[in-house]
């Protein structure tokens, strides 16, 4: 059976640096940092007192108050970003076959704030089990996809992928495969996360995973910089509409790009640390290239996982050199996490969107906050430091790696009619 072609026809974003696609893209190109002191709770006793929160967001501007109260923030973010993407795709709902439209969503943690709140209230209530009846449906990681399908009546395949920070890239790859294998014509995909909470910050601090640069949050996320000291926790959502090419063409849809391929691998090394030589990262990029039927020299750029952790940035840089050889020195590499922070399960979605927009506009967003070269990272690699660069981007990869050794990579390319 011949595989069907898959294109992107809609985008939506709710991020720490912009609450819609245009705001997000403008901030990326301007090199705008999203980190600032936490406003959600008192951080007096926390090692890290800052994060990349979504700003100037009032959920009641998008969702009726009664309904919003039934959703954790991560699900609210999913609804808002997917609504922008669905509107962007400009479907005719009178003719759209909703049995052939599905939703595959990603979230690494799901309703962490809801879980935290209910357990804390139980603990404060002398052991009396007075739980909110919406506790479970607000908390579970699959409910965001359920809300999206209910809102629009989409009756196709519907599930959630959970692979830590690779979650929404895995969701995107699954959605891509369901369309090209003929199980659906349209998929709403992406991911959302809202882990800037007492439990989220406390847990990541206990692992020594977060930056503690409290004196200068704006420069705390500094991928590939010698003085990086951990990632900055972010929140938000990204949504993409994937569509079978002929289906999109028949309805005269605006097409951003084509999805070329996806790769998946495991480090099989450690529950949180990457393999020091980047073997899993190498394998996932090679798998993605094979799936797309492309050669390393066909790729113009890689939006790296690039979290700003001491081990991760080195391992990924080594993997890129292993995959691309001398071509690695002619590509544009970048880490948009330097601006957005790390959105965990939503990272892959917003970074795939950044890759898609770099193709659309011919501009590569920068890796900001670079001050000092790391002697463990090859200086021949072009990480697009501190300033966006113009380039005709035809093929772009986006990498995401998660705790547990989960690796996912997606490739997008300019549409060839």
Image (cartoon, rainbow, N blue to C red):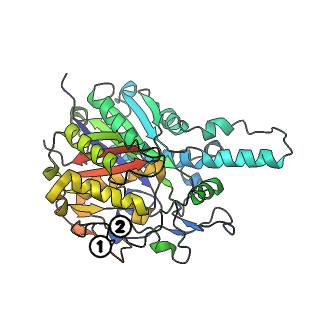
Q: Tell me where residue 416 sits by quadrant.
A: top left
Q: Nearer the viewer, residue 337 or 25?
A: 337
Most extreme residue toward the right, as rendered? 126
Name the residue nearer the viewer: 172 or 206.
206
- Pointer 2 with pointer 1, Cβ within 8 A: no
- Residue 12 appears anywhere in the view: no
Q: Is residue 14 among the parts visible in the rendering?
A: yes
Instruction: Relative to 139, say whether 181 is above or below.
Output: above
Left or right: residue 234 versus residue 317 is right
Residue under the image location 14 percent in, 46 percent down: 295
Q: Position of residue 224 (x, y in %)?
A: 35, 67
Residue 204 lies, in percent from the top left, at 57, 56
| Residue 179 occupies quadrant | top left
| Placement of the C terminus among the 4 image quadrants | top left
For this orientation, the residue located farthest to the top is 1
Q: Which residue is mark 2?
A: 224
Question: Is 346 located above or below residue 173 in the figure?
Answer: below
Q: How many marks?
A: 2
Which residue is denoted by mark 1 in the rendering?
387
Lower sequence index among marks 2 and 1:
2
Specify whether 326 is left or right of 166. left
Q: Which residue is painted at 25% across and 32% down in the image?
A: 247
Where is residue 152 drawn, in percent x and y?
46, 35
| Distance CA(mark 2)–CA(mark 1) | 15 Å
Task: Give how far across and how far down residue 284 sits, in percent.
Answer: 30, 44
């Amino acid at each position: 059976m011949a595989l069907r072609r898959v294109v992107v026809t809609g985008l939506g974003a709710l991020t720490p640096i912009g609450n819609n696609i245009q705001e997000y893209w403008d901030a990326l190109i301007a090199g705008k940092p999203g980190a600032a002191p936490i406003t959600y709770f008192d951080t007096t006793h926390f090692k890290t007192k800052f994060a990349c929160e979504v700003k100037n967001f009032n959920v009641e501007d998008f969702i009726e108050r009664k309904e919003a109260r039934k959703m954790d923030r991560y699900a609210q973010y999913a609804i808002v970003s997917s609504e922008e993407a669905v509107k962007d795709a400009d479907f005719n709902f009178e003719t759209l076959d909703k049995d052939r439209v599905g939703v595959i969503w990603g979230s690494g943690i799901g309703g962490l704030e809801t879980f935290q709140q209910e357990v804390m209230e139980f603990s404060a209530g002398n052991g009396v089990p007075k739980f909110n009846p919406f506790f479970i449906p607000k908390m579970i990681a699959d409910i965001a996809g359920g809300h999206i399908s209910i809102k629009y009546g989409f009756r196709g395949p519907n599930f959630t992928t959970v692979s830590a920070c690779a979650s929404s890239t895995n969701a995107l790859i699954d959605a891509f495969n369901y369309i090209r294998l003929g199980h659906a014509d349209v998929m709403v995909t992406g991911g959302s996360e809202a882990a800037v909470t007492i439990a989220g910050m406390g847990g990541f601090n206990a692992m020594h995973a977060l930056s503690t640069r409290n004196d200068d949050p704006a420069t705390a996320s500094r991928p590939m910089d010698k003085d990086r000291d951990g990632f900055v926790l972010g929140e938000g959502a990204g949504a993409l509409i994937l569509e079978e090419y002929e289906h999109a063409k028949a309805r005269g849809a605006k097409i951003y790009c084509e999805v070329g391929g996806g790769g998946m691998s495991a480090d099989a090394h450690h529950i949180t640390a990457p393999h020091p030589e980047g073997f899993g990262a190498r394998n996932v990029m090679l798998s993605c290239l094979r799936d797309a039927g492309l050669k390393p020299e066909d790729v113009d750029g890689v939006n790296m996982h690039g979290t700003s952790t001491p081990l991760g940035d080195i391992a990924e840089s080594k993997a890129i050199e292993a995959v691309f050889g001398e071509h690695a020195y002619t590509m544009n590499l970048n880490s948009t996490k330097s601006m957005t922070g790390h959105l965990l399960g939503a990272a892959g979605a917003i970074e795939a969107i950044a890759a898609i927009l770099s193709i659309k506009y011919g501009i590569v967003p920068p890796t900001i906050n670079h001050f000092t070269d790391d002697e463990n990272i090859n200086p021949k690699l072009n990480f697009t430091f501190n300033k966006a660069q113009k380039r005709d981007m035809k093929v772009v990869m986006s990498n995401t790696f998660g705790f547990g050794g989960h690796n996912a990579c997606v490739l997008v390319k300019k549409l060839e009619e």
